[in-house]
Image (cartoon, rainbow, N blue to C red):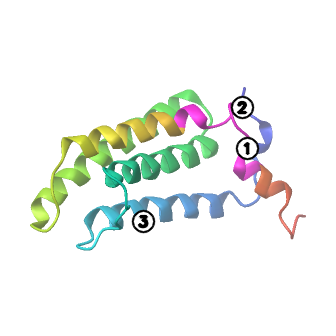
Amino acid sequence: MIPVAALQWPHRRLWHAIGILLIGAVVELSLTPHPLEIGVEHGDKYGHVLAYASLMFWYAQLYPRTGARIGFAIGFVAMAVGLEFLQRLTGYRTFEIADMVAGAIGVATGWIVAPPRSPCVIEQLEARWPFRR
C-alpha cells in the first residue's frame, strides 16, 4: 500500500534533486581518473554495491509503486553496465563484469531494504522539517 503522504510531500522537488545528485555522484565516481580507494580486498565491489543500493533505496522511496520500482531497477542496472563500457573507453579505468554484477546486487539490495521493510527516510525528514507549514 502506498502512503498517501508520499504523494503529497511538500519538498518533493528537493528529494528529486538529491536523487539526481546521487546519480551524478555515481557517474562521476565511475569515470574519474582517481577513484576512491576502499582499503579492503575487492573494496571497489563493495563500493558498487553501496552506490547502487543507495540509488535504488532513494528512488524506491520516491516511487513506491512496483511498476516504477521495476523501471528504476532496470535503469540502474543498465547504468551500471553502461558505465563499465564507458570505463573501458577512458584508457585509465578498467572494464569488469564483476562490477556490473556488484551494481545489480546493489540494486536488488536497495529494493529489498526499502520501505515498507524499513522506515521511509524521506517521510521522516518531512515530519521533522523545521519549516513545516
> What's under tag 2, amino acid-wise?
Ile
Does the segment drawn in magenta span residue 13? Answer: no
The tag earlier along the polypeptide, 1 or 3, is: 1
Residue 93 position within the rendered picture, expressed as x and y whole percent measured from the top left = 17, 63
Q: Can you name the residue that lies furthest to the bottom here?
A: 34
Residue 2 numbered tag: 2
Magenta residue span: 111-123
Residue 46 position within the rendered picture, expressed as x and y whole percent measured from the top left = 40, 49
Q: Separation of disc 1 and disc 3 at Cα?
A: 25 Å
Quick check: marks 1 and 3 in contact, CB under 8 Å? no
Residue 58 position within the rendered picture, expressed as x and y whole percent measured from the top left = 57, 49
From this view, report whether residue 90 is shown above or below residue 57: below
Quick check: marks 2 and 1 in contact, CB under 8 Å? yes
In the picture, which quadrant includes the C terminus? bottom right
Q: Residue at x 13, y 66 (%)?
A: 90
Q: Quadrant of residue 100?
A: top left
Quick check: marks 3 and 2 in contact, CB under 8 Å? no
Left or right side of 92 for 123: right
Residue under label 3:
25
Neighbour class for label 1 at 10 Å: few (<14), some, many (≥20)?
A: some
User: Which is more foreground, mark 3 or mark 2?
Assistant: 3
- Element type at mark 3: helix
Q: Quadrant of residue 5?
A: top right
From this view, report whether residue 78 is shown above or below residue 116: below
Residue 106 numbered tag: none
In the picture, which quadrant includes the N terminus? top right
Neighbour class for label 2 at 10 Å: few (<14), some, many (≥20)?
A: few
> What's under tag 1, amino acid-wise?
Ala
